């Protein structure tokens, strides 16, 4: 099973700041990596797939990069609606599909 | 409107069974693989099971093998999860999720709002 590790667990940032979230895989997942955003009390929403491809309707301030075992999600200028929990997920080696434990973005 | 709506959750005693349903609308259901993903209270996401468009390919997480059964009825645009021998650690919000293609090995591009399963005596 591939273990996905996200860091940090919590990040306190101010609106307007640029933020980078990290996700590491225990072995290579090529570019088969997705990012999701989960607002409180809501279902996850797909942000990025293929490590760097924005899903339909996702603002350009969200970008993904990386391949192999190291990945990042960058939000260029945080908006109030971006404060949420973010998960990475690998779909290269399955079953199982595995998620990271999540990074929570908090308002500083 | 493109959506997934789960139902069937509730309070159930350990060792009992429950069947979850997911109704799909707004897209051609039998063009896509489907999955169940769960989230224990205050915890992260855990993949449960996936099924290809024609039910030919089915996978489970190890902890669910032999206890859970995924199925689909394309004529009814519906996905199901039969859960037997339920344990306290199965307590979670169960999401129905759509893959972007007919095969199972993808990410999830559409999620329902979930149905809560609580296993307790």
Image: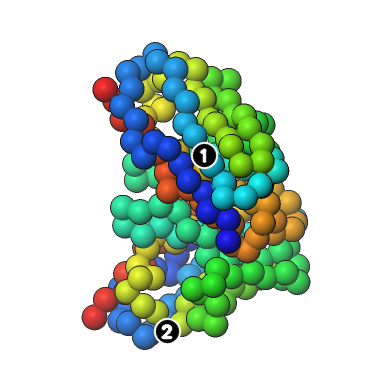
For residue B79, what is the image quadrant?
bottom right
Chain of the residue where label 2 is placed in the rendered structure: B
The quadrant of the picture occupied by the N terminus of chain A is: bottom right
Q: Residues within 10 Å of mark 2 (few under 14, many from 20)?
A: some
The residue drawn where x is 27% and y is 76% is B120
Which image quarter is the C terminus of chain A in?
A: top left
Query: Is there any visible trace of residue A23 in the rendered image?
Result: yes
The residue beneath circle 1 is A23
**What residue sits 51% from the left and 74% below the top?**
B64
Residue name at image x 62 percent, y 50 percent:
A27
Give percent across and percent down for residue A33: 62, 43
Side (left or right) of B74 relative to A69: right
Residue B19 in percent (x, y) is at 47, 75
**Badge 1 density bin: few <14, some 14–19, many ≥20, Cα 10 Å:** many
The relative height of residue A90 versus residue A104 in the rendered view (above or below) is below
Q: Is residue B4 visible?
A: no
Secondary structure of the residue carrying tag 2 is loop
Q: CA distance from mark 1 to mark 2?
A: 35 Å
| Left or right: A51, with B117 as reference point | right
Q: How is the image coloured?
A: rainbow
Between A19 and B8, the one lying in front of the other is A19
In percent of width and height, residue B81 lies at 53, 72
Q: Residue pushed farthest front?
A: A27
| Foreground of the two, A54 or B74 | A54
Vertical side of A8 occupied by B62: above or below = below
Helix, strand or loop under label 1? strand
Q: Are marks 1 and 2 in contact (CB under 8 Å)?
A: no
**Any mark on residue B85, and which?**
2
Instruction: Name which quarter of the figure residue A103 lies in.
Output: top left
Q: Position of residue B112 (x, y in %)?
A: 50, 52
């Amino acid at each position: 099973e591939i273990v996905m590790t996200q860091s940090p667990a919590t990040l306190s940032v101010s609106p307007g700041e640029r933020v980078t979230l990290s996700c590491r895989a225990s072995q290579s997942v090529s570019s088969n990596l997705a990012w999701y955003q989960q607002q409180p009390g809501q279902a996850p929403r797909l942000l990025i797939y293929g490590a760097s491809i924005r899903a339909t309707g996702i603002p350009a301030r969200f970008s993904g990069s990386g391949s192999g075992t190291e990945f990042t999600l960058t939000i260029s200028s945080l908006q109030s609606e971006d404060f949420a929990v973010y998960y990475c997920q690998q779909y290269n080696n399955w079953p199982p599909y595995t998620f990271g434990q999540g990074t929570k973005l908090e308002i500083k | 409107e493109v959506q997934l709506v789960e139902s069937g959750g509730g309070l159930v005693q350990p060792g009992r069974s429950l069947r979850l349903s997911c109704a799909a609308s707004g897209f051609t259901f039998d063009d896509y693989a489907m999955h169940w993903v769960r989230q224990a209270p205050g915890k992260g996401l855990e993949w449960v099971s996936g099924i290809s468009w024609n039910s030919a390919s089915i996978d489970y997480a190890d902890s669910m093998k032999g206890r859970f059964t995924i199925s689909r009825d394309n004529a009814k645009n519906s996905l199901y999860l039969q859960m037997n021998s339920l344990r306290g650690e199965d307590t979670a919000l169960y999401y129905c999720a759509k893959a972007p293609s007919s095969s199972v090995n993808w990410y999830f591009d559409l999620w329902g709002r979930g149905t809560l399963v609580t296993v307790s005596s």
